[in-house]
């Protein structure tokens, strides 16, 4: 059985570089996106299935992780400066949600 990965932040800087590499290796990828209609370019990758969700929404993460073997967590807010309140929701709480959902789904790895 082929491994299936969930990639958070699939349309961000890191994610958009990971998807082609994962596809070249024949890995099935679920790309977590907040709005699939805004990222129609993901359909050009044969092994990528966009799934609607948000790292701040634990219910959508649990749904996206059903049957997933591993997670590459690349979602995060990045800026060189800013208020903590701008970073904590996604970078801290979002990561906490990804870890909880991955554990509940039985994912073997989170990177």
Image (cartoon, rainbow, N blue to C red):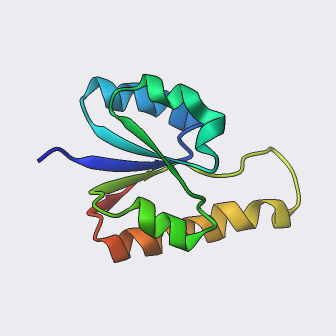
Q: Determine whether 109 is above or below 39 in the image.
A: below
Horizontally, residue 103 falls left or right of residue 25, namely right
Residue 68: percent from left, percent from top? 30, 57
- Label count reads 0
Q: Determine whether 101 is above or below 71 in the image.
A: below
Horizontally, residue 55 falls left or right of residue 70, namely right
Q: Residue at x 32, y 55 (%)?
A: 70
Q: Residue at x 26, y 63 (%)?
A: 108
- Name the foreground residue: 37 vs 14: 37
Q: Farthest residue in the left direction?
A: 1
Residue 13: image quadrant is top right
Q: Is residue 4 visible?
A: yes
Horizontally, residue 77 falls left or right of residue 84, namely left
Q: Residue at x 61, y 65 (%)?
A: 94
Q: Determine whether 5 is above or below 47 in the image.
A: below
- Name the foreground residue: 49 vs 72: 49
- Name the foreground residue: 69 vs 51: 51
Residue 55: percent from left, percent from top? 59, 62
Residue 39: percent from left, percent from top? 60, 34
Q: Is residue 12 visible?
A: no
Q: Residue at x 56, y 57 (%)?
A: 53
Residue 32: percent from left, percent from top? 51, 49
């Amino acid at each position: 059985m082929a491994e299936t990965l969930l990639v958070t932040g699939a349309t961000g800087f890191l994610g958009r570089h990971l998807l082609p590499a994962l596809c070249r290796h024949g890995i099935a990828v679920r790309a977590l996106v907040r709005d699939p209609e805004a990222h129609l370019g993901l359909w050009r990758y044969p092994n990528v299935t966009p799934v609607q969700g948000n790292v701040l929404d634990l219910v959508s993460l649990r749904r996206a992780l059903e049957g997933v073997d591993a997670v590459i967590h690349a979602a995060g807010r990045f800026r060189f400066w800013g208020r903590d309140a701008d970073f904590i929701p996604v970078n801290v709480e979002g990561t906490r949600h990804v870890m909880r959902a991955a554990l509940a789904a039985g994912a073997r790895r989170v990177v």
